[in-house]
Image (cartoon, grey):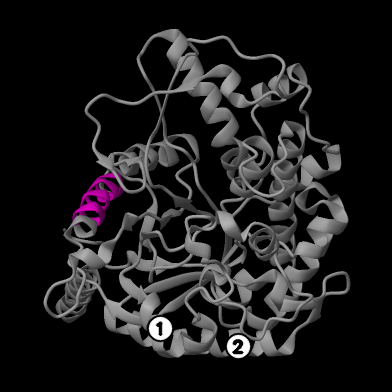
Amino acid sequence: MALPNDFILGAASSAWQTEGWSGKKETQDSYIDLWYKNNKHVWHNGYGPAIATDFYNRYKEDVALMKEIGLTHYRTSINWSRFLTDYEDAIVDEEYAAYLDSLIDELIQNGVEPMICLEHYELPAVLFETYGGWGSKHVIELFVKYAEKVFERYGDRVKNWFTFNEPIVVQTRMYLDAIRYPFEQNTQKWMQWNFNKALATAKVVQLFRKKGYKEKSGSKIGVILNPEVTYARSSAKHDQDAARKHDLFFNKMFLDPSIKGEYPSELFELMEKHDIAFDAADSELQIIKEHTVDYVGLNLYFPHRVKARTTAWNDSVPFHPAYYYEMFELPGRKMNPFRGWEIYPQIMLDMALRMRGEYGNIEWFIAENGMGVENEFTNKDEEGIIQDDYRIEFISEHLKWLLKGVEEGSNCTGYMLWAFTDNVSPMNAFKNRYGLVEIDLEEGRNRRMKKSAYWYKEINHKREMSVKNDEIYK
Protein backbone atom coordinates (compact mmCIF):
# COMPACT_ATOMS: atom_id res chain seq x y z
CA MET A 1 0.00 0.00 0.00
CA ALA A 2 1.74 3.14 -1.27
CA LEU A 3 0.54 6.32 0.41
CA PRO A 4 1.06 9.66 -1.35
CA ASN A 5 4.04 11.45 0.17
CA ASP A 6 1.98 14.29 1.64
CA PHE A 7 -0.93 12.09 2.73
CA ILE A 8 -2.09 12.62 6.33
CA LEU A 9 -1.92 9.48 8.45
CA GLY A 10 -3.10 10.46 11.90
CA ALA A 11 -5.59 9.76 14.63
CA ALA A 12 -8.34 11.60 16.46
CA SER A 13 -10.02 12.04 19.82
CA SER A 14 -11.92 14.87 21.51
CA ALA A 15 -11.51 16.98 24.63
CA TRP A 16 -14.46 15.59 26.59
CA GLN A 17 -13.63 11.98 25.73
CA THR A 18 -10.04 12.21 26.97
CA GLU A 19 -9.31 15.12 29.33
CA GLY A 20 -11.39 14.28 32.39
CA TRP A 21 -12.61 16.88 34.89
CA SER A 22 -9.27 17.63 36.55
CA GLY A 23 -9.09 21.41 37.03
CA LYS A 24 -12.66 21.98 35.81
CA LYS A 25 -14.73 24.51 37.76
CA GLU A 26 -18.21 23.63 39.00
CA THR A 27 -19.72 26.21 36.64
CA GLN A 28 -18.03 24.70 33.58
CA ASP A 29 -20.19 21.70 32.83
CA SER A 30 -20.81 20.89 29.18
CA TYR A 31 -24.00 19.35 27.80
CA ILE A 32 -22.23 15.97 27.99
CA ASP A 33 -21.33 16.54 31.66
CA LEU A 34 -24.92 17.50 32.41
CA TRP A 35 -26.27 14.40 30.71
CA TYR A 36 -23.77 12.18 32.54
CA LYS A 37 -24.66 13.68 35.93
CA ASN A 38 -28.39 13.28 35.29
CA ASN A 39 -28.26 9.81 33.72
CA LYS A 40 -25.06 8.15 34.89
CA HIS A 41 -26.83 4.79 35.05
CA VAL A 42 -27.18 4.61 31.24
CA TRP A 43 -23.42 4.87 30.71
CA HIS A 44 -21.79 1.43 30.51
CA ASN A 45 -20.46 0.48 33.96
CA GLY A 46 -20.87 4.12 34.99
CA TYR A 47 -17.77 5.30 33.12
CA GLY A 48 -18.07 8.80 31.66
CA PRO A 49 -16.26 12.09 31.11
CA ALA A 50 -15.30 12.61 34.78
CA ILE A 51 -11.94 10.84 34.46
CA ALA A 52 -12.01 9.71 30.82
CA THR A 53 -8.36 8.89 29.94
CA ASP A 54 -6.94 11.64 32.19
CA PHE A 55 -5.31 13.25 29.14
CA TYR A 56 -5.35 16.63 30.90
CA ASN A 57 -2.64 15.36 33.27
CA ARG A 58 -0.97 12.84 30.97
CA TYR A 59 -0.86 14.58 27.59
CA LYS A 60 2.95 14.65 27.46
CA GLU A 61 3.01 10.87 27.87
CA ASP A 62 0.40 10.53 25.13
CA VAL A 63 2.15 12.92 22.74
CA ALA A 64 5.31 10.86 23.18
CA LEU A 65 3.31 7.83 22.07
CA MET A 66 1.97 9.75 19.07
CA LYS A 67 5.55 10.52 18.08
CA GLU A 68 6.62 6.89 18.55
CA ILE A 69 3.73 5.66 16.39
CA GLY A 70 4.60 8.30 13.81
CA LEU A 71 1.31 10.16 13.59
CA THR A 72 1.54 13.06 11.16
CA HIS A 73 -1.53 14.76 12.65
CA TYR A 74 -3.65 14.59 15.80
CA ARG A 75 -7.18 15.95 15.88
CA THR A 76 -8.86 16.95 19.10
CA SER A 77 -11.21 19.66 20.31
CA ILE A 78 -11.15 22.61 22.65
CA ASN A 79 -13.78 22.23 25.34
CA TRP A 80 -15.83 25.41 24.97
CA SER A 81 -17.39 24.92 28.41
CA ARG A 82 -13.91 24.89 30.01
CA PHE A 83 -12.15 27.48 27.86
CA LEU A 84 -14.30 30.30 29.23
CA THR A 85 -15.43 31.29 32.70
CA ASP A 86 -18.02 33.75 31.35
CA TYR A 87 -19.79 32.70 28.15
CA GLU A 88 -21.60 36.01 27.56
CA ASP A 89 -18.46 38.16 27.62
CA ALA A 90 -16.02 35.44 26.52
CA ILE A 91 -13.70 35.63 29.54
CA VAL A 92 -10.93 33.08 29.11
CA ASP A 93 -10.08 30.56 31.83
CA GLU A 94 -6.32 31.10 31.91
CA GLU A 95 -5.62 27.78 33.61
CA TYR A 96 -7.31 25.73 30.89
CA ALA A 97 -5.93 27.99 28.15
CA ALA A 98 -2.40 27.46 29.49
CA TYR A 99 -2.91 23.69 29.32
CA LEU A 100 -3.91 24.05 25.65
CA ASP A 101 -0.90 26.29 25.01
CA SER A 102 1.36 23.59 26.39
CA LEU A 103 -0.43 20.77 24.53
CA ILE A 104 -0.19 22.54 21.17
CA ASP A 105 3.50 23.32 21.72
CA GLU A 106 4.16 19.73 22.78
CA LEU A 107 2.52 18.37 19.63
CA ILE A 108 4.44 20.70 17.33
CA GLN A 109 7.76 20.03 19.06
CA ASN A 110 7.20 16.30 18.54
CA GLY A 111 6.41 16.63 14.85
CA VAL A 112 2.66 16.08 15.18
CA GLU A 113 0.46 18.67 13.47
CA PRO A 114 -2.50 19.72 15.67
CA MET A 115 -5.97 19.82 14.12
CA ILE A 116 -8.43 21.65 16.36
CA CYS A 117 -12.21 21.49 16.44
CA LEU A 118 -14.15 24.21 18.27
CA GLU A 119 -17.09 22.04 19.35
CA HIS A 120 -17.29 18.27 19.75
CA TYR A 121 -20.53 17.99 21.81
CA GLU A 122 -19.09 20.45 24.40
CA LEU A 123 -21.84 23.08 24.36
CA PRO A 124 -21.76 24.74 27.82
CA ALA A 125 -24.56 23.28 29.95
CA VAL A 126 -25.67 26.72 31.15
CA LEU A 127 -26.33 27.76 27.55
CA PHE A 128 -28.44 24.66 27.04
CA GLU A 129 -30.42 25.27 30.22
CA THR A 130 -30.78 29.04 29.76
CA TYR A 131 -31.30 29.41 26.00
CA GLY A 132 -32.10 25.93 24.73
CA GLY A 133 -28.63 25.37 23.33
CA TRP A 134 -28.27 25.40 19.54
CA GLY A 135 -31.94 26.24 19.16
CA SER A 136 -30.99 29.83 20.03
CA LYS A 137 -29.59 32.43 17.63
CA HIS A 138 -28.00 34.13 20.65
CA VAL A 139 -25.89 31.01 21.26
CA ILE A 140 -24.55 31.39 17.72
CA GLU A 141 -23.24 34.84 18.60
CA LEU A 142 -21.67 33.51 21.80
CA PHE A 143 -19.98 30.76 19.77
CA VAL A 144 -18.47 33.36 17.44
CA LYS A 145 -17.15 35.30 20.46
CA TYR A 146 -15.62 32.11 21.81
CA ALA A 147 -14.06 31.30 18.42
CA GLU A 148 -12.50 34.76 18.24
CA LYS A 149 -10.79 34.25 21.61
CA VAL A 150 -9.49 30.85 20.52
CA PHE A 151 -8.13 32.17 17.22
CA GLU A 152 -6.41 35.07 18.99
CA ARG A 153 -4.71 32.65 21.36
CA TYR A 154 -3.65 29.82 19.03
CA GLY A 155 -4.06 31.13 15.47
CA ASP A 156 -0.31 31.62 15.12
CA ARG A 157 0.42 27.92 15.63
CA VAL A 158 -2.62 25.89 14.58
CA LYS A 159 -3.09 25.59 10.80
CA ASN A 160 -6.09 23.26 10.67
CA TRP A 161 -9.37 24.47 12.18
CA PHE A 162 -12.89 23.06 12.27
CA THR A 163 -16.10 24.51 13.65
CA PHE A 164 -17.93 21.30 14.61
CA ASN A 165 -17.47 17.58 14.73
CA GLU A 166 -20.60 15.78 13.50
CA PRO A 167 -22.94 18.76 13.92
CA ILE A 168 -26.04 16.67 13.19
CA VAL A 169 -25.51 14.00 15.84
CA VAL A 170 -26.40 15.53 19.22
CA GLN A 171 -29.82 16.85 18.22
CA THR A 172 -30.58 13.69 16.25
CA ARG A 173 -30.15 11.62 19.40
CA MET A 174 -31.95 14.22 21.57
CA TYR A 175 -34.85 15.51 19.47
CA LEU A 176 -35.30 13.17 16.53
CA ASP A 177 -34.81 9.74 18.11
CA ALA A 178 -35.25 10.89 21.75
CA ILE A 179 -32.68 8.43 23.10
CA ARG A 180 -30.50 10.96 24.96
CA TYR A 181 -31.15 13.59 27.58
CA PRO A 182 -33.61 15.37 27.65
CA PHE A 183 -35.41 12.63 25.65
CA GLU A 184 -37.76 14.93 23.71
CA GLN A 185 -39.11 14.02 20.27
CA ASN A 186 -39.38 17.35 18.43
CA THR A 187 -38.49 17.35 14.75
CA GLN A 188 -38.86 21.10 14.26
CA LYS A 189 -36.39 21.69 17.09
CA TRP A 190 -34.06 19.18 15.39
CA MET A 191 -34.29 21.19 12.20
CA GLN A 192 -33.56 24.49 13.96
CA TRP A 193 -30.45 23.06 15.62
CA ASN A 194 -29.31 21.82 12.19
CA PHE A 195 -29.74 25.24 10.61
CA ASN A 196 -28.23 27.18 13.49
CA LYS A 197 -25.08 25.05 13.43
CA ALA A 198 -24.71 25.57 9.68
CA LEU A 199 -25.12 29.31 10.24
CA ALA A 200 -22.62 29.21 13.12
CA THR A 201 -20.08 27.56 10.81
CA ALA A 202 -20.58 30.25 8.18
CA LYS A 203 -20.24 33.04 10.74
CA VAL A 204 -17.03 31.58 12.15
CA VAL A 205 -15.66 31.16 8.62
CA GLN A 206 -16.55 34.82 8.04
CA LEU A 207 -14.64 35.81 11.19
CA PHE A 208 -11.66 33.62 10.28
CA ARG A 209 -11.34 35.24 6.85
CA LYS A 210 -11.87 38.73 8.19
CA LYS A 211 -8.95 38.19 10.57
CA GLY A 212 -6.77 37.02 7.67
CA TYR A 213 -5.43 33.81 9.22
CA LYS A 214 -5.04 32.10 5.85
CA GLU A 215 -2.89 34.94 4.58
CA LYS A 216 -0.93 35.28 7.84
CA SER A 217 -0.11 31.63 8.42
CA GLY A 218 -1.57 29.55 5.59
CA SER A 219 -4.23 28.06 7.85
CA LYS A 220 -7.61 26.68 6.76
CA ILE A 221 -11.03 26.33 8.31
CA GLY A 222 -13.63 23.66 7.70
CA VAL A 223 -16.15 21.40 9.37
CA ILE A 224 -16.16 17.70 10.18
CA LEU A 225 -19.30 15.92 8.97
CA ASN A 226 -20.55 12.35 9.23
CA PRO A 227 -22.43 11.66 5.99
CA GLU A 228 -24.27 8.37 6.07
CA VAL A 229 -23.21 6.74 2.79
CA THR A 230 -26.64 5.68 1.59
CA TYR A 231 -27.50 2.72 -0.64
CA ALA A 232 -30.94 1.80 -1.95
CA ARG A 233 -32.08 -1.81 -1.64
CA SER A 234 -32.71 -1.99 -5.38
CA SER A 235 -32.79 0.04 -8.58
CA ALA A 236 -36.57 0.26 -8.38
CA LYS A 237 -37.94 3.80 -8.26
CA HIS A 238 -39.56 3.39 -4.85
CA ASP A 239 -36.28 2.27 -3.26
CA GLN A 240 -34.29 4.95 -5.06
CA ASP A 241 -36.73 7.59 -3.82
CA ALA A 242 -36.37 6.29 -0.27
CA ALA A 243 -32.56 6.51 -0.49
CA ARG A 244 -32.76 10.03 -1.92
CA LYS A 245 -34.94 11.21 0.96
CA HIS A 246 -32.60 9.62 3.52
CA ASP A 247 -29.63 11.29 1.85
CA LEU A 248 -31.43 14.63 1.80
CA PHE A 249 -32.17 14.69 5.53
CA PHE A 250 -28.95 13.19 6.88
CA ASN A 251 -26.24 14.05 4.34
CA LYS A 252 -27.15 17.03 2.19
CA MET A 253 -28.47 18.76 5.32
CA PHE A 254 -24.88 19.81 6.10
CA LEU A 255 -22.83 18.94 3.02
CA ASP A 256 -24.73 21.38 0.81
CA PRO A 257 -24.72 24.55 2.95
CA SER A 258 -21.12 23.93 4.09
CA ILE A 259 -19.69 23.35 0.61
CA LYS A 260 -22.20 24.76 -1.88
CA GLY A 261 -23.56 27.54 0.31
CA GLU A 262 -27.20 26.60 -0.14
CA TYR A 263 -29.83 24.01 0.75
CA PRO A 264 -31.57 21.76 -1.78
CA SER A 265 -34.95 23.16 -2.83
CA GLU A 266 -36.59 19.80 -2.09
CA LEU A 267 -35.63 20.14 1.56
CA PHE A 268 -37.58 23.40 1.85
CA GLU A 269 -40.56 21.74 0.17
CA LEU A 270 -40.54 18.84 2.62
CA MET A 271 -40.08 21.11 5.63
CA GLU A 272 -43.17 23.07 4.61
CA LYS A 273 -45.14 19.91 3.88
CA HIS A 274 -44.45 18.46 7.32
CA ASP A 275 -44.49 21.74 9.26
CA ILE A 276 -40.90 21.43 10.47
CA ALA A 277 -39.31 24.45 8.76
CA PHE A 278 -36.44 26.17 10.52
CA ASP A 279 -36.44 29.91 11.12
CA ALA A 280 -33.98 31.42 8.63
CA ALA A 281 -33.76 35.06 7.59
CA ASP A 282 -32.70 35.90 4.04
CA SER A 283 -29.65 37.66 5.47
CA GLU A 284 -28.64 34.47 7.31
CA LEU A 285 -29.01 32.38 4.16
CA GLN A 286 -26.81 34.94 2.41
CA ILE A 287 -24.10 34.56 5.06
CA ILE A 288 -24.15 30.80 4.46
CA LYS A 289 -23.95 31.36 0.71
CA GLU A 290 -20.94 33.68 0.94
CA HIS A 291 -18.89 31.83 3.56
CA THR A 292 -18.38 28.21 2.59
CA VAL A 293 -15.59 26.11 4.11
CA ASP A 294 -12.04 25.62 2.82
CA TYR A 295 -12.19 21.84 3.26
CA VAL A 296 -14.13 19.13 5.07
CA GLY A 297 -13.33 16.15 7.24
CA LEU A 298 -15.66 13.18 6.83
CA ASN A 299 -16.33 10.53 9.47
CA LEU A 300 -17.16 7.25 7.74
CA TYR A 301 -17.73 3.97 9.54
CA PHE A 302 -20.38 1.85 7.82
CA PRO A 303 -22.99 1.98 5.02
CA HIS A 304 -26.65 2.90 5.52
CA ARG A 305 -29.00 0.79 3.45
CA VAL A 306 -32.62 1.76 2.99
CA LYS A 307 -35.75 0.61 1.20
CA ALA A 308 -39.19 2.01 0.58
CA ARG A 309 -41.58 1.66 3.50
CA THR A 310 -43.49 -1.62 3.63
CA THR A 311 -45.60 -0.58 6.64
CA ALA A 312 -47.83 2.45 7.08
CA TRP A 313 -46.51 5.45 9.01
CA ASN A 314 -48.22 6.16 12.32
CA ASP A 315 -49.59 9.68 11.83
CA SER A 316 -50.19 10.09 15.56
CA VAL A 317 -46.44 10.49 16.21
CA PRO A 318 -44.31 13.50 15.20
CA PHE A 319 -42.81 13.50 11.74
CA HIS A 320 -39.52 11.67 11.31
CA PRO A 321 -37.58 11.29 8.03
CA ALA A 322 -38.26 7.54 8.38
CA TYR A 323 -41.72 8.48 7.10
CA TYR A 324 -40.07 7.93 3.69
CA TYR A 325 -37.93 4.84 4.26
CA GLU A 326 -37.09 1.78 6.31
CA MET A 327 -33.64 0.43 7.05
CA PHE A 328 -32.55 -2.57 5.01
CA GLU A 329 -30.16 -5.35 6.06
CA LEU A 330 -28.13 -6.71 3.16
CA PRO A 331 -28.16 -10.54 3.21
CA GLY A 332 -24.70 -12.00 3.72
CA ARG A 333 -23.22 -8.73 4.85
CA LYS A 334 -19.94 -8.71 6.81
CA MET A 335 -20.49 -7.44 10.34
CA ASN A 336 -18.64 -6.10 13.33
CA PRO A 337 -20.62 -8.18 15.85
CA PHE A 338 -19.58 -6.02 18.81
CA ARG A 339 -20.78 -2.70 17.44
CA GLY A 340 -23.57 -4.05 15.23
CA TRP A 341 -22.25 -2.22 12.17
CA GLU A 342 -21.78 -3.58 8.67
CA ILE A 343 -18.20 -3.62 7.39
CA TYR A 344 -18.17 -2.34 3.81
CA PRO A 345 -14.88 -0.61 2.90
CA GLN A 346 -16.19 0.44 -0.52
CA ILE A 347 -17.92 3.38 1.20
CA MET A 348 -14.54 5.11 0.95
CA LEU A 349 -14.42 4.97 -2.85
CA ASP A 350 -18.08 5.79 -3.29
CA MET A 351 -17.82 8.89 -1.08
CA ALA A 352 -14.56 9.88 -2.79
CA LEU A 353 -16.26 9.83 -6.19
CA ARG A 354 -19.23 11.76 -4.82
CA MET A 355 -16.95 14.48 -3.43
CA ARG A 356 -15.23 14.68 -6.81
CA GLY A 357 -18.40 14.78 -8.87
CA GLU A 358 -21.06 16.49 -6.76
CA TYR A 359 -19.06 18.80 -4.49
CA GLY A 360 -16.56 20.43 -6.84
CA ASN A 361 -13.71 18.12 -5.81
CA ILE A 362 -13.20 20.19 -2.66
CA GLU A 363 -10.27 19.18 -0.47
CA TRP A 364 -11.39 16.58 2.07
CA PHE A 365 -10.01 13.83 4.26
CA ILE A 366 -11.23 10.98 6.43
CA ALA A 367 -11.52 12.54 9.87
CA GLU A 368 -12.71 9.34 11.55
CA ASN A 369 -12.85 5.66 10.66
CA GLY A 370 -12.33 2.77 13.00
CA MET A 371 -13.47 -0.48 14.56
CA GLY A 372 -14.89 -0.81 18.06
CA VAL A 373 -14.33 -4.18 19.72
CA GLU A 374 -15.53 -5.46 23.08
CA ASN A 375 -13.37 -7.44 25.56
CA GLU A 376 -10.13 -6.83 23.67
CA PHE A 377 -8.14 -7.84 26.72
CA THR A 378 -8.89 -11.47 25.84
CA ASN A 379 -6.67 -11.07 22.76
CA LYS A 380 -3.44 -10.30 24.62
CA ASP A 381 -0.29 -12.29 23.91
CA GLU A 382 2.21 -13.48 26.51
CA GLU A 383 3.75 -10.01 26.61
CA GLY A 384 0.40 -8.36 27.32
CA ILE A 385 0.03 -6.75 23.88
CA ILE A 386 -3.44 -6.85 22.33
CA GLN A 387 -3.26 -8.73 19.04
CA ASP A 388 -5.86 -6.72 17.13
CA ASP A 389 -5.31 -8.18 13.67
CA TYR A 390 -8.99 -7.52 12.95
CA ARG A 391 -8.32 -3.78 13.31
CA ILE A 392 -5.29 -3.97 11.04
CA GLU A 393 -7.43 -5.72 8.42
CA PHE A 394 -10.22 -3.16 8.85
CA ILE A 395 -7.89 -0.17 8.40
CA SER A 396 -6.04 -1.82 5.50
CA GLU A 397 -9.18 -2.51 3.51
CA HIS A 398 -10.63 0.95 4.08
CA LEU A 399 -7.34 2.61 3.16
CA LYS A 400 -7.08 0.58 -0.05
CA TRP A 401 -10.53 1.68 -1.19
CA LEU A 402 -9.79 5.26 -0.18
CA LEU A 403 -6.58 5.29 -2.19
CA LYS A 404 -8.53 4.01 -5.21
CA GLY A 405 -10.57 7.19 -4.90
CA VAL A 406 -7.37 9.24 -4.81
CA GLU A 407 -6.12 7.44 -7.92
CA GLU A 408 -9.39 8.34 -9.65
CA GLY A 409 -8.83 12.02 -8.97
CA SER A 410 -10.71 12.68 -5.73
CA ASN A 411 -9.05 15.45 -3.73
CA CYS A 412 -8.65 13.38 -0.56
CA THR A 413 -5.61 14.37 1.49
CA GLY A 414 -5.55 11.94 4.39
CA TYR A 415 -6.88 9.34 6.79
CA MET A 416 -7.44 9.81 10.54
CA LEU A 417 -8.17 6.78 12.70
CA TRP A 418 -10.70 6.86 15.49
CA ALA A 419 -9.10 6.73 17.86
CA PHE A 420 -5.58 7.36 19.11
CA THR A 421 -6.35 5.69 22.45
CA ASP A 422 -9.35 3.85 23.78
CA ASN A 423 -11.70 6.49 25.13
CA VAL A 424 -15.17 7.18 26.48
CA SER A 425 -18.10 7.23 24.07
CA PRO A 426 -21.64 8.45 24.83
CA MET A 427 -23.42 5.76 26.87
CA ASN A 428 -21.15 3.07 25.41
CA ALA A 429 -18.31 4.40 27.63
CA PHE A 430 -15.30 2.03 27.38
CA LYS A 431 -17.37 -0.99 26.31
CA ASN A 432 -16.13 -1.04 22.71
CA ARG A 433 -12.48 -0.11 22.25
CA TYR A 434 -11.24 1.78 19.20
CA GLY A 435 -7.71 2.85 20.06
CA LEU A 436 -4.25 2.14 18.71
CA VAL A 437 -3.29 2.42 22.37
CA GLU A 438 -4.98 0.47 25.17
CA ILE A 439 -6.23 2.31 28.26
CA ASP A 440 -6.11 -0.12 31.19
CA LEU A 441 -8.94 0.90 33.51
CA GLU A 442 -7.81 -1.54 36.19
CA GLU A 443 -4.26 -0.19 36.32
CA GLY A 444 -4.72 3.55 36.72
CA ARG A 445 -5.46 4.10 33.03
CA ASN A 446 -1.97 2.99 32.02
CA ARG A 447 -1.18 3.04 28.31
CA ARG A 448 0.07 0.18 26.15
CA MET A 449 0.44 0.11 22.38
CA LYS A 450 -1.61 -2.55 20.59
CA LYS A 451 -0.36 -4.56 17.63
CA SER A 452 -2.19 -2.12 15.34
CA ALA A 453 -0.07 0.74 16.73
CA TYR A 454 3.13 -1.04 15.69
CA TRP A 455 1.60 -1.71 12.27
CA TYR A 456 0.55 1.96 11.91
CA LYS A 457 4.11 2.90 12.87
CA GLU A 458 5.48 0.69 10.10
CA ILE A 459 3.23 2.27 7.47
CA ASN A 460 4.35 5.73 8.51
CA HIS A 461 8.00 4.67 8.51
CA LYS A 462 7.74 3.28 4.98
CA ARG A 463 6.15 6.49 3.76
CA GLU A 464 8.86 8.59 5.47
CA MET A 465 11.55 6.51 3.77
CA SER A 466 9.79 6.98 0.43
CA VAL A 467 9.74 10.75 0.95
CA LYS A 468 13.46 10.77 1.83
CA ASN A 469 14.30 8.66 -1.23
CA ASP A 470 12.36 11.04 -3.45
CA GLU A 471 14.23 14.00 -1.99
CA ILE A 472 17.58 12.27 -2.56
CA TYR A 473 16.59 11.48 -6.15
CA LYS A 474 15.59 15.09 -6.77
Give the numbered dot on residue 62: 1
Residue 154 screen position, x and y as percent: 63, 81
Q: Name the quarter where the N terminus is drawn.
A: bottom left
Circle 1 SS class: helix
Residues rendered magenta in the picture: 393-406
Q: Residues within 10 Å of mark 1 (few under 14, many from 20)?
A: some
Measured along the vertical axis of the image, is residue 62 above or below residue 421? below
Q: Tell me if I can see residue 223 in this picture.
A: no
Residue 2 screen position, x and y as percent: 18, 60
Q: Residue at x 40, y 59 (%)?
A: 431
Quadrant of the rendered image containing residue 24: bottom right
Give the numbered dot on residue 99: 2
Quadrant of the rendered image containing residue 79: bottom right
- Most prominent secondary structure in the magenta stretch? helix
Q: Tell me if I can see residue 123 in this picture.
A: yes
Image side of residue 216 versus residue 418, left or right: right
Q: Residues within 10 Å of mark 2 (few under 14, many from 20)?
A: some
Q: Residue at x 81, y 61 (%)?
A: 127
Residue nearest the observer in this picture, 306 or 177: 177
